[in-house]
């Protein structure tokens, strides 16, 4: 079960990271209301992605 939790955290944070980067660059999904929110959210998604990858590598 822990592997599925790591995979789902990596998948969700990866998709959100992509959406926030797209919003920052081409203003597509959220119409770029505030670039600071996009930057902070992208950093948070990248941190969660790294932590999920690190937890998954500990489980292997």
Image: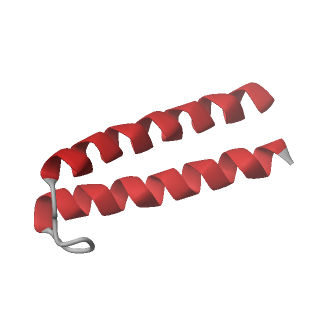
Q: Is residue 22 left or right of residue 53?
A: left
Q: Position of residue 22 (x, y in %)?
A: 23, 63
Compared to residue 26, the image places residue 38 above or below, namely above
Question: In the shown orientation, is residue 46 left or right of residue 37?
Answer: right
* Residue 56 in picture, x, y percent from top left: 70, 35
Rendered residue at 13%/67% (across/down): 26
Tell me if 51 is positioned left or right of 2 in this view: left
Quadrant in the picture for residue 31: bottom left
Q: What residue do we see at 56% from left, 56% from top?
A: 11
Q: Residue furthest right?
A: 1
At 34% from the left and 58% from the top, the residue drawn is: 18
Q: Which quadrant of the view contains residue 2?
A: top right
Residue 60 visible within the image: no
Indicate the position of residue 35 as horizontal and vertical percent values: 14, 51
Percent position of residue 23, x then y:
21, 63
Of the 4 image quadrants, the one containing the C terminus is top right
Say left or right for 23 vs 4. Answer: left
Q: What's the residue at 45%, 60% (across, down)?
A: 15
């Amino acid at each position: 079960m822990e592997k599925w939790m790591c995979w789902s955290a990596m998948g969700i944070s990866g998709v959100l990271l992509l959406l926030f980067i797209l919003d920052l660059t081409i203003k597509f999904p959220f119409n770029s209301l505030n670039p600071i929110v996009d930057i902070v959210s992208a950093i948070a998604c990248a941190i969660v992605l790294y932590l999920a990858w690190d937890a998954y590598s500990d489980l292997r």
